[in-house]
Amino acid sequence: MAMTDLPAGAQAGFIDQDMRSGEGWSERLADMLATCRVFVPLFSPRYFASEMCGKEWYAFAQRVIYEQAKNNTTAEAIVPALWWPVPPEQLPGPAERLQFNHRDFGDLYVTEGLYGLVKLRIFEAEYERAVYELAKRIVSVADSSAIGPGRPVDYRNVPSAFGASGGPRPLQVTVAAPTRHDLPEGRTSHYYGDMAQDWNPYHPDSTRPLAYVARDLVRSLNYQADIISFDEVFVPHEGKQEPGRPEILLLDRWALRDEEQRERLAAFDAEHRPWVSVIVPWNREDEQSRAAEAELSDWLERTMPKKTGQGRAASRAAARGVPSMEAFGQLLPQIVEAAAQQYLKHATAYPPTGGGHMERPRLRGPMAAEYATTHYVPQTHDLAPDAEDTDDSTS
């Protein structure tokens, strides 16, 4: 409060522990996440193990990504605090990528965290320094980031930013769209660039190509995304295509006016690739797209009947047309999850090498001899077939 120009009695910050029993905690948290200017996660092992904390992080991170897309900025509005130090290798991708130097708050803060400093009276001065420097950083970021308010979302229904353990998971974002050099006749070039990856269907609301917005969003889900053009995708005419990773295909319906692209997309659709989810961004503010919607929708249904008519409700909705950046951000986590599940279902399994009969595990090491003298360990030939089967099924 002392570092701001807020009037007396104003609320400088919010923590969910301030809520009273019986209060609509979900609605109030949604409002706070949609309007706060800075997000301060308190790093600790328990924090990153919490699914609800991961949901709060993702709900706020969406706002930052939208702001970057609208203004082509590199806004940073997350200021982490160390409640208890977490080794870098244990940080999920979204936290690991934060550019933040904790040593500005003191060396003891880095090694002990706020919890360690506040528990030991001899560190009282270091604790006060860390809190003071943290407060300065929060106010500075609030003044410089200028993150606009967003629409409240039910953060209970958004995914966790921390995803699965084990580091970022691979994902491919493929773009099927014209470039400004090969546009269909009469199509404006405002939405296109020198490469298919430059396609920006939500212009002028967004100043960034959609593929890079999608990459940032999936990075907030602890994925590592590669971006390629559909022209780079190998489309075999025979044989089964093995999955390499989950894939999201961003499709511009204007590309369907090109006969060669229609043929390649139809061949792609004819293959069995359930790990590929299709999203069709369709800006309702684009007058040319509105005028040609019936024609291009018909081309899409005839060219890719499988991808537009199968999957979950979210997948079918994504293929029918996503009208805005906000709608795209709400659908994308569901589409990514569907693609990831199908990938795991169809990916090649790699069982242990060797095969054949595996011996039962036996105790070895320093205690093996003593254990053998005090316990009877039955061997395979000691067991009748029925007994062996029973032992295997219950172990």
Image (cartoon, grey):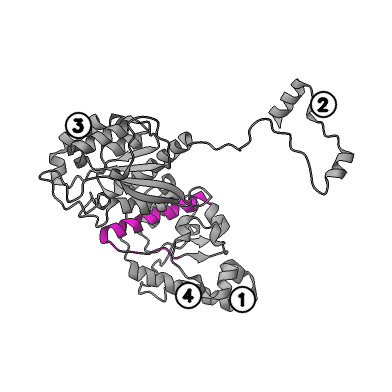
Question: Sequence order check: which comes first, mark 1 or mark 3?
Answer: 1
For marks 4 and 3, give the CA distance. 59 Å
Q: Estimate the x, y position of residue 18 in percent, counting from the top left.
A: 48, 59
Could you say which is closer to the camera, residue 300 or residue 102? 300
Q: Is residue 21 left or right of residue 208?
A: right
Which of the 4 image quarters holds residue 123? Answer: bottom right
Provide the major secondary structure of the magenta segment.
helix
Which of the 4 image quarters holds residue 63? Answer: bottom left
User: Which kind of residue does numbered mark 2 sit on?
Assistant: Asp
User: Which kind of residue does numbered mark 4 sit on?
Assistant: Glu
Q: Residue furthest toward the left?
A: 186
Q: Which residue is mark 4?
A: 133
User: Which kind of residue does numbered mark 1 sit on?
Assistant: Phe
Question: Sequence order check: which comes first, mark 4 or mark 3?
Answer: 4
Q: Which residue is mark 2?
A: 382
For marks 2 and 3, give the CA distance. 70 Å
Frontmost of labels 1 and 3 is 3
Q: Which residue is mark 1?
A: 123
Frontmost of labels 4 and 3 is 3
Which of the 4 image quarters holds residue 369? Answer: top right
Question: Sequence order check: which comes first, mark 2 or mark 3?
Answer: 3
